[in-house]
Image (cartoon, helix red, strand yellow):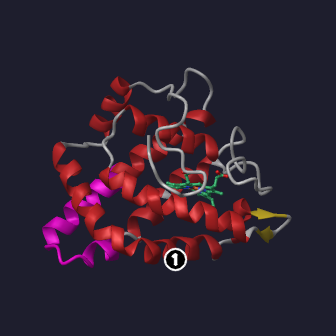
Amino acid sequence: METTNIPGYAYGQVNRSPVTLAELELLKQTVLFSAADVAALAQAGQVLAPQTDAILDVWYGFVGAHPYLLRYFSLHGQPDGAYLARVRARFGQWIIDLCTKPYDQAWLDYQHEIGLRHTTAKKNLTDGAQAEPLIHLRYLTTFIVPLTATIKPFLQNGGSSTDEVEAMHAAWFKAVTLTATLWSYPYVKEGQF
Ligand code: HEM
């Protein structure tokens, strides 16, 4: 069980994912995820950890600059500052988890939980928010691009070689694609994931 004081962060304490580890293995093969990516992500975790706040400033800036995204944190057009702040802390932890956690049953289970938290099943529940009840799937997938494009300068800040930065960036792209794919599960019709 995890010991962290981040409100609403429930890694290791959630229901089992309907996706099996065998299915996850095939998804990893599909995004060309290898042992080299695990190593590159571990390195990325070390580079990114001290920069988490600056990364989140960029991502929150992106959301804040696009009203059609900010609405998911808003009620009647008014952004909910407390909600934004609580999600931000968990988002920061996600950066570290994505890079450093083993992709085992606990990780798989938490991916399903995060997916649910983007849908009507669980959105707003964790933080007692009253914002939009659902994040549309189309933005979950397209968000892979800004999250991947904007991480590169931060990967370059760690004094790594150009080849290492490229390897970390490629591994990050695969990992984010993998997670966004797992998060799509609750959106699709039963049997069609
Ligand atoms: C929650 C990442 C797409 C808005 C979260 C959390 C993470 C995350 C890590 C917190 C999970 C936890 O509770 O532990 C991502 C990633 C995305 C993505 C990696 C795409 C690849 C989006 C988009 C929006 C969005 C497009 C729209 C603005 C939110 C909101 C929450 C949330 C409002 C809080 C949900 C709740 O009420 O619990 N996201 N997200 N996310 N995200 Fe996303």
Nearest the viewer among 92 and 119 is: 92
Q: Which residue is mark 1?
A: 57
Nearest the viewer among 100 and 188 is: 100
The magenta-colored residue range is 152-174
Q: Which residue, as the protein is rendered here, is positioned at the far top?
A: 191
Q: Secondary structure at mark 1?
A: helix
**The magenta stretch spans residue 171:** yes
Q: Position of residue 124 (x, y in %)?
A: 72, 51
Q: Which residue does the image show at 35% across and 68% down from the upper left?
A: 49
Q: Position of residue 15 (x, y in %)?
A: 55, 30
**The magenta stretch spans residue 68:** no
Question: Callout 1: few (<14), some (14-19), or many (20+) C-alpha neighbours within 10 Å?
Answer: few
Three-letter code, disc 1: Asp
Q: Is residue 134 above or below residue 73?
A: above
Q: Which residue does the image show at 32% across and 57% down from the upper left?
A: 172
Nearest the viewer among 84 and 156 is: 84
User: Is the stretch drawn in magenta largely helix, strand or loop?
Assistant: helix
Quick check: 180 left or right of 81? left
Quarter holding ligand 1: bottom right
Question: In the picture, which quadrant includes the N terminus?
Answer: top left
Q: Is residue 78 above or below residue 94?
A: below
Q: Which residue does the image show at 27% across and 79% down from the upper left?
A: 157
Nearest the viewer among 27 and 35 is: 35
Q: Is residue 68 shown to the viewer in this render?
A: no
